Amino acid sequence: MQRTFVMIKPDGVQRGLIGRILSRLEDRGLKLVAAKLMWVSRELAEAHYAVHKNQPFYPKLIDYITSSPVLAMVWEGPEAVAAVRQTMGATRPREAAPGSIRHDFGLDVGRNLTHASDSAENAEAEIRLWFKPEEILSWDRDLDRWIFE
Ligand code: IDP
Ligand code: MG
């Protein structure tokens, strides 16, 4: 099983979409292993988005992510990184596939609702950045044998 870091960004929380976004991941069979509602400090936002530091949109991205609480999570499943990226859809909501979260709930790239790690390496680094080891649970879901082959 693979783990991936997922965040519902401030627009998703403010718009009351937490439940619907989580339902899509649960419905798909992914398993929630950590979650916390939190204000993101500028320091954490800058560490998380360090790779985008030289992008023109970077200052606005940091303002956006720190503007209101986010829901930070870890989800687990087979090839969870790719599976969750697929459920989120392309970065630009107007280019995201119908049925994906970014398509179905969004329009602008600067209000694209969610973050999900884009590789196994980045998932491990992001989980380490956002969560303490004891905040991540190992638990058996009785349904697992009906979802995981
Ligand atoms: P991702 O979230 O799909 O991995 P990245 O390219 O890693 O997309 O960009 C990180 C975040 O930066 C995006 O989710 C979006 O919030 C923001 N972003 C990316 N490109 C633009 C842009 O051209 N204008 C405004 N914001 C952008
Ligand atoms: Mg990214």
Image: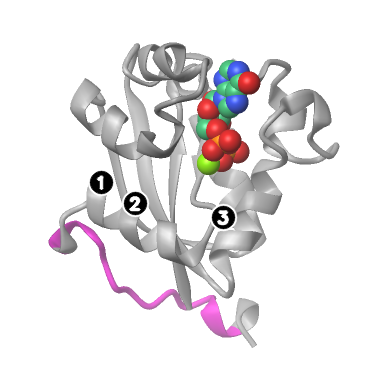
Viewer-proximal residue among 132 and 62: 62
State the residue at coordinates (63%, 51%). Answer: 85
130 lies left or right of 118: left
Sequence-first tag of 3 and 1: 3
Rendered position, 31 above or below 26:
below
Q: Residues within 10 Å of mark 2 (few under 14, many from 20)?
A: some
The answer to if 143 sits in the magenta stretch is yes
Q: Residue drawn 60% across and 54% down?
A: 84
Closer to the camera, 45 or 54? 54
Q: Position of residue 86 (x, y in %)?
A: 70, 52
Crowd tier of the residue under label 3, counting other residues whose Cα lies within 10 Å: few below 14, some 14–19, many 20 or above: few
Q: Which residue is mark 3?
A: 26
Which kind of residue does numbered mark 3 sit on?
Answer: Glu
| Residue at disc 3, secondary structure | helix
Disc 2 + disc 3, Cβ < 8 Å: no
Which residue sits at x=45%, y=27%? 9
- The front one of 129 and 101 is 129
Magenta highlight: main SS: loop
Magenta-colored span: 134-145
Up-down relation of residue 89 to residue 110 (above or below)? below
Residue lying at the far right of the rendered structure: 98
The kind of residue on which mark 2 rests is Glu
Compute the Cα span from label 2 to label 1: 6 Å
Label number found at residue 130: 1
Gap in Å between the C-alphas at discs 2 and 3? 21 Å
Q: How many marks?
A: 3
Compare marks 2 and 3 and give the one earlier in the sequence.
Answer: 3
Q: Secondary structure at mark 2?
A: helix
Pointer 1 residue Cβ closer than 8 Å to ligand 2: no
Image marks 2 and 1: residues in contact by CB distance under 8 Å: yes
Where disc 1 sits, the SS reads: helix
Q: Which x, y percent locates residue 18?
A: 49, 31
